[in-house]
Amino acid sequence: MEFIHAPKFEAEDLAWFNVPKPLEISDLKGKLVILDFWTFCCINCIHIIPTLKRLEESFPNHLVVIGVHSPKFPSEKNPDNVRQAIARYEIVHPVVHDPELRIWKQYAIRAWPTMVFIDPEGYILGQLSGEPDPDQMHATIEKLIDDMKTKGRLEGDAADLLETPLSGQSSILRFPAKIAYSEADREFAITDSNHNQIVTAGREGNITRRIGSGNIGHRDGTFEDVEFFRPQGLCYMNGIIWVADTENHRIRMIDLISGQVFTAAGTGNQGSFLKHEPTLGVQTAISSPWDVALHQGNLYFANAGTHQIGVYHIDDGKLSCFAGTGQEALVDGPRLKGAFAQPSGLSVGNGTLFLADSETSAIRGIHLNGGKVETYVGTGLFDFGDRDGQGKDAILQHPLGVHYSEGNLYIADSYNHKIRVIDLKTHTVSTLKASVDLVCDDASCSRLGEPAGVIAVESCLYVCDTNNHRVLKIDLKTGKTAVFIK
C-alpha cells in the first residue's frame, strides 16, 4: 500500500495557540499526529474534545494533537472568539486558526469533525469523520504507538512542542451560560459553566449560594460535595432548580429545601437517539442536554447531541422523545417528524415551546396543543447573517437562548453579539438597540460577547454576557444597562 505524504501547513501567517511558534509537518517528525478539523459551534466537535484529551494524557511523549479550527460562521473567523473557545473547552493542544479553510482544502476535508492521522515520517495513515468510539480510538492509538516503539520510529518528546496555556483570569463567573428566575423564591439562578457550579443571586445581584465543589465530576449530594461538568441551561421554580448538566450528559435536580442535588436523568454516558417509548430517566443515556424548560409537570430538554427535544415526566421519572427524528436539518410539521439542528435554548409561553435551533440559526416553536413544529426565523444549515425583518426575511447567527415574555420572544443572538426581539403577532424581528449601543454608568461596560442566555423580569432583561464573564441588566424603559454580576 502506498501512503501519501501529508501536505505542508504553510501556516506561519495564521494564528496559533498553545505553541511558542507555528508548526510545520517537518517539526512533527518522530511523533504520531492527529489533525482535528473542528469548529467551535459544532456539537460533534465538542463531543470529541474529551476523547482527544484522554489520548493526550495517555501518550504525552509520542502523540501530538493539532486542532485545525475551520470556521463555519463569520463570528468564528475572529481569532479572539477562537481564543475564548479554547479557554472555554480547556483545550491544551496546539490549535491553528484557519479562517479561509486553506489547510482544510489542502487535506480535502468535507465535514466537521474530521481527524487525519499522520505517521512519524509524515505520511497520512488515514482519516475519520464524525465521532469515534472513545475506547476503540484509545485502543487503536495505543496499538499504533506500541508498534511504532517496537520498530524504533518514535523520537523526541511531544511535550517540547507545547506551550502551557495561560490560566483564565479570576472572576466571580466564568463563561456563564443561562439565567433563570423564580418568582416564588424572588431569586435568580445562573449556570457558572466553567466554574462547574450553579450560582443563586438576589434581586440586587448579590450571590446567595454557590452549589458545587467546582471540581469536574458527576457526584450527587450536598451543595459542597456535588459535582457538575460545564452545565449550560437551567430553570428555577418553587425551591427547585433543574439543570442541564451538559458535558455529564445528565439532568440534575437541586432541592434548595433539603440542600441536596440528585440526578434525574442520564447515565453519564453519551446517548444515541431518544426513543418514543418512555424509559426510566436515570437508566437512559442522553446527549449533551443544553437547556431545560418546565411546564405543567413536564421538563422539556434540548438534547443537542442528537438534535431532538426530550421530555422528562417528573411524576414517574420517565423520559421520552418529544420532538425530532434525530436528523440534523430544518423540517417543520408534526413534532415527531420534525427535524432540528443543535437545539440550545428553550422557553415556554402562550401554549408553545420555543427553541433556539442554533446550527440553522433559526427560532422554532412546538405547539403543545397539537404538536406542530413551526419556524419563525431561519431557512437552513448554511443560511445565517445579521438582518432584521419580518419572519424569514430576518437572519440570525447561531442563537443560543430564548425567553418568552408578554407576546415577545427575546433571543440571545450569540454570534451577532446582541439581543433580538420577535413580536409574535407580526413575526417582526428587531434588534434591541440597548444591547448594541450600551448606555451604562459602569466604565467596564462593553459590547456583548457571545451572549448565551436572556430572561425578562418585570421591565428588565438579564443577559448572560458569556465571553465577558458577567450578567448584565438592561432596563427596557430607560434603555440603560448596568452590570448585575461580574
Image (cartoon, helix red, strand yellow):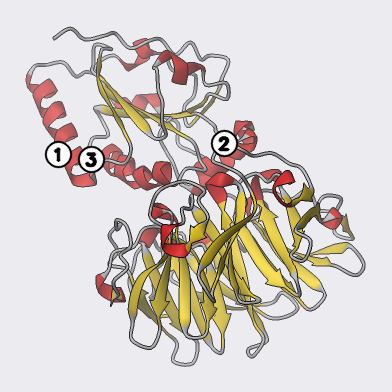
- Between the residue at mark 1 and the residue at mark 2, the CA separation in whole angstroms equals 36 Å
Q: Is residue 402 left or right of residue 462?
A: left
Q: Check disc 2 and report the residue beneath it.
A: 382
Could you say where residue 8 lies in the image, as x and y percent from the top left? 41, 10
Q: How many marks?
A: 3
Q: In which quadrant of the rendered view does residue 395 lie?
A: top right
**Mark 1 touching mark 2, by CB under 8 A?**
no
Rendered residue at 68%/70% (across/down): 404
Residue 171 in view here: no
Could you say where residue 334 lies in the image, as x and y percent from the top left? 47, 62
Compare marks 3 and 2 and give the one earlier in the sequence.
3
Q: Relative to 304, does residue 75 appear above or below in the rendering?
A: above
Q: Which residue type does callout 3 highlight? A: Ser
Q: Is residue 281 left or right of residue 391?
A: left
Compare marks 1 and 2 and give the one earlier in the sequence.
1
Rendered residue at 72%/52% (across/down): 391
Classify 10 Å Cα crowding around label 1: few (below 14), some (14-19), many (20 and above).
few
At numbered mark 3, what does the secondary structure look like: helix, strand or loop?
A: helix
Could you say where residue 308 lies in the image, as x and y percent from the top left? 42, 59
- Between the residue at mark 3 and the residue at mark 2, the CA separation in whole angstroms equals 37 Å
Q: In which quadrant of the rendered view does residue 260 lie?
A: bottom left
Q: Check disc 3 and report the residue beneath it.
A: 58
Q: Check disc 1 and report the residue beneath it.
A: 139
Rendered residue at 38%/10% (across/down): 7
At numbered mark 2, what does the secondary structure look like: helix, strand or loop?
A: loop
Q: Which residue type does callout 1 highlight? A: Ala
Q: Relative to 383, does residue 159 appear above or below in the rendering?
A: above
Q: Which is nearer the eye, 5 or 482?
A: 5
Q: Relative to 363, does residue 396 appear above or below in the rendering?
A: above
